[in-house]
Image: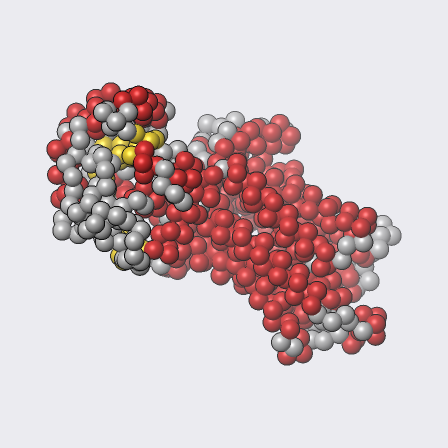
Amino acid sequence: MSEQSQFGLLSERRFAPFFWTQFLGAMNDNVFKNGMIIFMTFGGLTMAGMKTDLLVNAAGAVFILPFVLFSAFAGQLADKYEKTRVIRGVKIMEIAVMALAAVGFVAANLAILFACLFLMGLHSTLFGPVKYGILPQALKQEELIGGNGLVESGTFVAILLGTIVGGVVVAIVPSGPMYVAIATLVLAVIGYVISRKVPEALPTDPSLKLNWNPFTETARNIKLGMSNIVVWRSMLGISWLWFYGAMLLNQFAPMAKDVLGGNAQVATLLLAVFAIGVAVGSLLCERLSGHKVEIGLVPLGSIGMTVFALDLYFALKALPPLPATITSDIATHMGAMAFLKDSAHWRVLFDLFMLSVSGGLFSVPLYALIQERAEPTHRSRIIAANNIVNAIFMVVSALLAMALIKLFDFGVKELILTIAILNGIVALYIYVLTPEFLLRFVCWMIMSLSYKLSIKGMHNIPDKGPVIIVANHVSYVDALIISAAVRRPLQFVMDHNIFKTPGLGWVFRQMKAIPIAGSKEDPAKMEAAFARVRQALAEGEAVAVFPEGKLTSTGEMNPFRPGIERIVSETGAPVVPIALRGLWGSFFSRAKDGKAFRTFRGFFNRIEVEAGELVTASDVTAKRLEEAVLGMRGNGR
């Protein structure tokens, strides 16, 4: 497996031009949007007699509306056509829109600016499915988590930079609006020039017939997403993050003004801390996951999103109330430097940073999981469906916040407490419905806290179709270690006594492990186990077997039993041998007296998992598999 850092992708043509194209597009969206909002707010612009605060909220709705209306069409384009053609077409559209926006800024015409805001929302809508659909085509599987981390972190940094640049430039007196017009047009042109360097990405479904009806196509795309339950629940998880983030981000300005006594600088500081936190969390995913899609990070992220949001509530609640003179006179509000001098505010910033880091850990594996598990022929349409569901969740988030404020007089602190509690409830619901997330989290935690895991040869295991994994049996956590190393879900056949191990039994049940007993001990249980193995392989699943039949009590391998030959003869499934090294002598293996869990031995040992070449069913014998495993294991017990 490649150990190249994810940052190495930024020097490669297959990724770098695409990354900078999407970075500049996200930045330009926010330069234009924030520049327009501040120009509208402080420039005295109006339209149809509406008040400024209503226009500001309308601007958010106008920008998000294209995601609801056109995401389904955008997904079709990304699946049907060569993706770089779509990217360049979108960038040409961006140049045209920014040219029109320049007229709106110079003429101070709010109608033109709102039309351009809608069109920039359409620009982002069309780019979204290409953005995530192109990554699995451009990157190797072990690079997918790192590439997604770079894209997510880059997007949030671009949003932060765009928001700051738009606000600063438009405030330049007297030509700020003109400078914003020039900046957005220049960014659009640079983005198009860079997009010319993005390598070709072939269409995944060129025969697709375009459906121009947004409602029927939206329903069809959502149905495609729901056809794979893991993909669908990943989509719901990402949409929940947008729900959470939308409610939280909307509190930054009132939090800065009414709770912290700060001015616009403090609101910008809060946004900066949040964006940097998401970027850090996104980039951490690759290091924590070991270059693979590790959904065990999702529960870790959701725990952080709840814990640190709760602490943020208590941190805000612990602050003394602001004097009436400060709340009524905005000129007395403190700037960023004065804000940072108060040590009580550091807790607020720490909580905000950590909950946003947690959000990055939560989202990146889910995006990568959708890309990995979705069928390539309609991957972009599923991503489009995800964008639609995201938009719906964001709208619901805004409506809920408005209802809580109107009906119960909730303030910033109460809304943050609400989102923290809701996040905990939603997370528990997701993990009950899909135990695979929680199971991977348990595996990841045990491996991270107990061992240093090295993996080799996993490309020998087919991504799809029936396959049998055989391995030597050294410890009570062999199944967890193999699960952490192998990308696809496995059903383990294990001794029924190990299956009932206190503390690990729940994990084994969630893994759908198959308990087995010897023919003399319980022949009925043995036959039931063989029946479940046949069924799993018939359904195209991967099944893992420990042919020794028991844990080693000496560190040396026991002979492989002929049961593996029976499984292969009855199913015709190929076999991949796996060797475990470095586990003997650890806390979870037996000692000389035959007992385990006696002393804290072997923690943080370097352990190795190596997969050998696939063996076809016709070549399988217990002896040959035993020799293959023993050859890979060598002297490394």
Q: In this view, does 145 lie to the left or right of 521?
A: right
User: Which residue lies at the image location 27% right of the left edge and 22% below the top edge?
Assistant: 523
State whether residue 526 is above or below residue 363. above
Q: Which quadrant of the figure has residue 73?
A: top right
Work out whether residue 66 can be spotted: no
User: Which residue lies at the image location 22% right of the left edge and 47% below the top edge?
Assistant: 594
User: Which residue lies at the image location 43% right of the left edge and 37% below the top edge?
Assistant: 510
Q: Is residue 134 left or right of residue 67?
A: left
State whether residue 443 is above or below residue 194. above
Q: Which quadrant of the figure has residue 166?
A: bottom right
Picture coordinates of residue 435, whole percent (x, y): 47, 39
Q: Which quadrant of the figure has residue 348?
A: bottom right
Q: Is residue 517 left or right of residue 22?
A: left
Q: Is residue 532 left or right of residue 420?
A: left
Q: Residue furthest front?
A: 593
Pick the front one: 439 or 218: 439
Picture coordinates of residue 227, whole percent (x, y): 50, 29
Picture coordinates of residue 221, whole percent (x, y): 56, 32
